[in-house]
């Protein structure tokens, strides 16, 4: 059963909550569990910001299917390659062969290392510091944030609604 949350008129949280963990990354106590955050923008082009951990794989795909409402998934923005952000990238791309990936060069390299059997050669659009992407009404600027957590981290800023997708910054 799906569980999504409307953030704005065209932005939907499609992530999932994981209450099975008592300790996140073996260090941090999380008595109420964790939330794996993934957001779907329904603009002229559909854009998914990150995926989720494999622990909530089924819920995530149910949420995404419901939120897309039969539309194709045009873009996936990958901001961070740690498994709680990117573990379901392969499953997503197999389900949505039409989807293009927006990521930086370091993420591209890590995708090849993490998902060796997946040919992404013609599906990746590289972004750099200050690159701009338009999905229709929304315009995004990409900001590199190496070592916010890992060296490949980047953030996306929606200039239209003034929303920051901060990867692991907060």
Image (spheres, grey):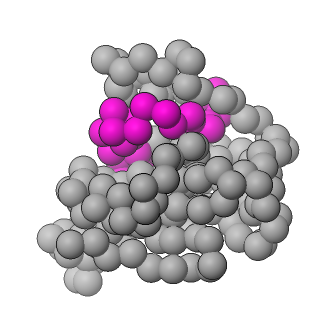
Looking at the rendered image, the quarter that the N terminus falls into is bottom left
Residue pushed farthest front?
Answer: 70
Q: Residue at x 62, y 38 (%)?
A: 102
Residue pushed farthest left?
Answer: 20
Question: Which residue range is magenta in the image?
Answer: 82-106
- In this rendering, would 150 be left or right of 138? left
- In this rendering, would 106 be left or right of 127? left
Q: Residue 130, image x and y in percent? A: 84, 44
Q: Is 72 within the magenta?
A: no
Q: Is 94 within the magenta?
A: yes
Q: Residue 4, image x and y in percent? A: 39, 75
Number of marks in the rendered image: 0
- In this rendering, would 9 be left or right of 28? right
Q: Residue 112, image x and y in percent? A: 44, 21
Q: Residue at x 62, y 36 (%)?
A: 103
For residue 16, what is the image quadrant?
Answer: bottom left
Q: Is residue 34 visible?
A: no
Looking at the rendered image, the quarter that the C terminus falls into is bottom right
For this rendering, which residue is in front, 103 or 40?
40
């Amino acid at each position: 059963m799906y569980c999504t949350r409307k953030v704005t008129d065209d932005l939907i949280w499609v992530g999932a909550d994981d209450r099975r963990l008592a300790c996140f990354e073996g260090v941090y106590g999380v008595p109420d569990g964790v939330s794996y955050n993934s957001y779907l923008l329904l603009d002229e082009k559909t854009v998914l910001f990150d995926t989720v951990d494999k622990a909530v794989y089924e819920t995530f795909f149910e949420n995404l299917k419901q939120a897309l409402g039969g539309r194709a998934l045009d873009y996936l923005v990958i901001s961070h390659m740690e498994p709680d952000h990117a573990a379901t990238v392969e499953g997503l791309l197999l389900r949505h062969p039409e989807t293009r990936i927006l990521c930086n060069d370091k993420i591209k390299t890590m995708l090849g290392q993490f998902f060796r059997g997946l040919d992404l050669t013609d599906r990746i659009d590289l972004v750099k510091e200050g690159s701009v992407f338009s999905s229709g009404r929304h315009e995004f600027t990409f900001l590199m944030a190496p070592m916010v957590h890992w060296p490949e981290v980047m953030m996306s800023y929606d200039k239209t609604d003034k929303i920051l997708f901060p990867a692991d910054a907060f």
